[in-house]
């Protein structure tokens, strides 16, 4: 198993409480990856394009995966997903939707727009811990992210 501890994770989450719980579980699972948080869709775009408060590359390293809440203020997760996946320079970044919505239309729309995974936030703490642990096991420990530095084309 290859574990990449230096690859940053970008979490798009507007709820301070949900993010605090997420961070607590990440510490419990001894996740060493840097975690960056944006609380709305516009801030995510600023982060990715290194605009606004993220003008310096040091402040906004390219994420190896984005954990995306759908119900963000301003530009919501559905539209944000579409914008990111339409941009050639960001479309390879895996995006895992992490939301309370179990609506089949949301699930279908997200996959149509390029989501790489869809996780439903469970209500109970044990179930939430299990879901986050599954995310960590696959996306941060098992999955091999694309090499964003490579300019080679696979033929």
Image (cartoon, grey):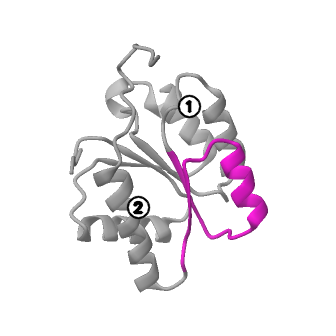
Magenta includes 153? no
Q: Quadrant of residue 153?
A: top left
Residue 74 in sight: no
Q: Earlier in the sequence, mark 1 or mark 2?
A: 1
At 53% across and 29% down in the image, what residue appears?
Answer: 90
Is residue 33 depicted above or below 45 in this figure?
below
From the top left corner, tell me how far across and down residue 150 is, in percent: 36, 18
Circle on res. 135: 2
Q: Quadrant of residue 86?
A: top right
Magenta includes 121? yes
Residue 88 in sight: yes
Left or right placement of residue 137 versus residue 108 in this view: left
Which of 142/110 is in front? 142
At 40% across and 61% down in the image, what residue appears?
Answer: 135
At 50% across and 32% down in the image, what residue appears?
Answer: 92
Is residue 75 depicted above or below 127 in this figure?
above
How many C-alpha atoms fall within 10 Å of the one at disc 2: few (<14), some, or many (≥20)? some
At 34% across and 41% down in the image, what residue appears?
Answer: 144
Which of 10/47 is in front? 10
Which of 24/53 is in front? 24
Q: Which residues are magenta?
A: 95-122
From the top left corner, tell me how far across and down residue 56 is, in percent: 38, 24
Which residue, given by chain and number where applicable, does mark 1 sit on?
91
Q: CA distance from mark 1 to mark 2?
A: 20 Å
């Amino acid at each position: 198993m290859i574990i990449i501890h230096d690859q940053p994770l970008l979490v798009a989450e507007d709820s301070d409480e949900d993010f605090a719980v997420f961070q607590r579980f990440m510490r419990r699972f001894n996740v060493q990856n840097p975690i960056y948080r944006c609380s709305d869709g516009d801030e995510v775009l600023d982060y990715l394009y290194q605009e606004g408060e993220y003008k310096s590359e040091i402040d906004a390293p390219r994420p190896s995966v984005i954990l995306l809440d759908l119900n963000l203020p301003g530009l919501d997760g559905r539209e944000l997903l579409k914008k990111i996946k339409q941009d050639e320079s960001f479309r390879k970044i895996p995006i895992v939707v992490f939301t309370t919505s179990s609506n089949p239309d949301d699930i279908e729309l997200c996959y149509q727009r390029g989501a790489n995974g869809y996780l439903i936030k469970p209500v109970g703490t044990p179930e939430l811990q299990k879901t986050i642990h599954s995310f960590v096991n696959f996306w941060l420990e098992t999955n091999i992210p694309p090499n964003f530095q490579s300019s080679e084309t696979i033929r």
